[in-house]
Image (cartoon, rainbow, N blue to C red):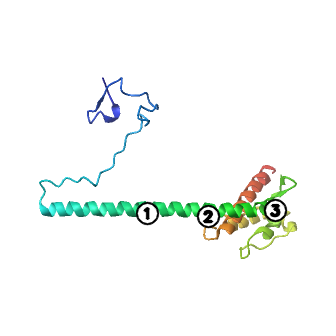
Amino acid sequence: VTVDPKTANGGTVKKASQSAPPGVADSSGADANKPKLKGVSLDNVNLAGKSAAVATAVQSRVNEMKTSQQKALNEIREREAAKKKSEDEEDVVRRRLEPKIKAWAEEHGKKKQLRALLASLDTILWPGAKWKPVNLGDLLDDRKVKLNFHKASRVVHPDKTMSLNAEERFIAKRIFDALSQAKTEFDNSK
């Protein structure tokens, strides 16, 4: 007979023949290292021997907890449904816009350089994006390339595009990825 160190304070004793090795699932299929969580049952509240006031208060609290649980469950389901809808919208947009973005970011199967991406950024951005077109001649200086990269990043960064529709968010996300990869290549070439 061995004492389980996790429950030694409670005095739980396990027989050596019944415990599974660490990390191995026991016969019930649960991992032996994970404690089994048991929630509080709200259905079988024992009110025997309680005064009427206590019984009413307990029943009231149980009803509040059930309502709270149902509300939380509904909120989780709504969030999951909204997330799935957003992912489905993005998938539809991806299928439609992927060739356009690929044509902007690549040429003959090779990724374009950062200067070329920044110079042509106005052709791929959505209408109303806060981006002033830049000439390739303005990007000959490395310092100006970095400056314009940071300006472009502020326009298309995923944290800044959360309020846009699915199409614009997708475009911004792909532009940000392409610019980031090109910036890494630009920094590595120096």
Residue 181, given in percent of the width and then of the height, sits at 75, 54
Look at discs 3 and 2 and give the one toward the viewer: 3
Q: Residues within 10 Å of mark 3 (few under 14, many from 20)?
A: some
Q: Please, is residue 148 above or below residue 185 in the view?
A: below
Separation of marks 3 and 1 at Cα, in angstroms: 43 Å
What secondary structure is found at the residue carrying circle 1?
A: helix
Q: For the point 79% across and 60% down, which residue is it?
A: 99
Q: Earlier in the sequence, mark 3 or mark 1?
A: 1
Q: Please, is residue 83 above or below residue 32 in the view?
A: below
Residue holding disc 1: 74
Residue holding disc 3: 104
Residue holding disc 2: 159
Q: Residues within 10 Å of mark 2 (few under 14, many from 20)?
A: few
Q: Please, is residue 55 above or below residue 12 in the view?
A: below
Observer able to see residue 153: no
Separation of marks 3 and 2 at Cα, in angstroms: 23 Å
Q: For the point 57% across and 60% down, which residue is it?
A: 84
Residue 167, given in percent of the width and then of the height, sits at 69, 67
Mark 2 is on which residue type? Asp
Cβ atoms at labels 3 and 1 below 8 Å apart? no
Q: Is residue 45 left or right of residue 134?
A: left
Q: Residues within 10 Å of mark 1 (few under 14, many from 20)?
A: few
What secondary structure is found at the residue carrying circle 3?
A: helix
Separation of marks 2 and 1 at Cα, in angstroms: 27 Å
Q: Quadrant of residue 67?
A: bottom left
Observer able to see residue 47: yes
Mark 3 is on which residue type? Trp
